[in-house]
Amino acid sequence: MRRLHSTLGIAALVLGLAACGQQPAEDIGFGGQPPAPQPGPVEPKPEHERVQVPAEAVDASALPEDYPRQVWTQDGGMAIVATGQEGGCSKVHAEVAEQTADHVKVILVEETPEPPGICTMDLRYPPVAVQLSQPLEDRKVVLEEKDVKVPR
């Protein structure tokens, strides 16, 4: 009898925990279409597959004096590629901060691990890319940079 009660108790517990599992976030219903996948990160294409943005269409005044200022488009103007700057243990990536009818603001984010460890003393200038909601066309590209500490 004791064994039967233990078995029933364990079964009830397992059933109760299973019922508390995560439910689907969105019910699409019968015949509905699932939501479109979010665009993933954009990989910069080789330089010969990009189109350089003219210097007069780039506002890099917020960047430090020695920061690279090269900007390209790829994928028919649907992506911007800029030259980032990273060094030692840090890594750079780009984020679109703003898209208006006359400009696109791109922030070059350098992530540095905290606490600092043993790192090399070198600088690297990798291309970083961001996806746009509409082609760049005649809009100006505004570049800014930001340093962020990330946990190790």
Image (spheres, rainbow, N blue to C red):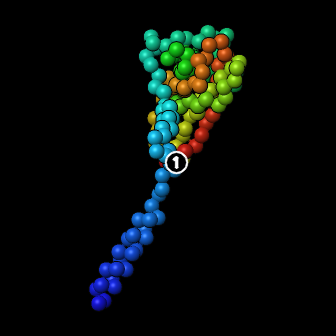
User: Which residue, given by chain and number where applicable, does mark 1 sit on?
Assistant: 26
Residue at 55%, 20% in the rendered image: 78
Picture quarter containing residue 142? Answer: top right
Question: Where residue 57 appears, x then y in whole percent?
Answer: 66, 12
Q: Quadrant of the N terminus?
A: bottom left
Relative to 65, 14 lies left or right: left
Residue at 59%, 12% in the rendered image: 53
Question: Where residue 116 appears, x then y in whole percent?
Answer: 52, 45
**Residue 37 visible in the shown view:** yes
- Give 19 or 65, whichever is nearer the viewer: 19
Element type at mark 1: loop
Relative to 48, 104 lies left or right: right
- Give 128 or 130, whichever is nearer the viewer: 130
Residue at 59%, 18% in the rendered image: 135
Residue at 45%, 12% in the rendered image: 49
- Give 37 or 112, whichever is nearer the viewer: 37
113 to 63, vertically: above or below: below
Question: Where residue 39 appears, x then y in whole percent?
Answer: 50, 31
Q: Residues within 10 Å of mark 1 (few under 14, many from 20)?
A: few
**Residue 68 visible in the shown view:** no
Relative to 38, 141 lies left or right: right
34 to 70, vertically: above or below: below
For badge 1, the amino acid type reads Glu
Question: Where residue 93 appears, x then y in whole percent?
Answer: 53, 31
Picture quarter containing residue 3? Answer: bottom left
- Count of number-bearing discs: 1
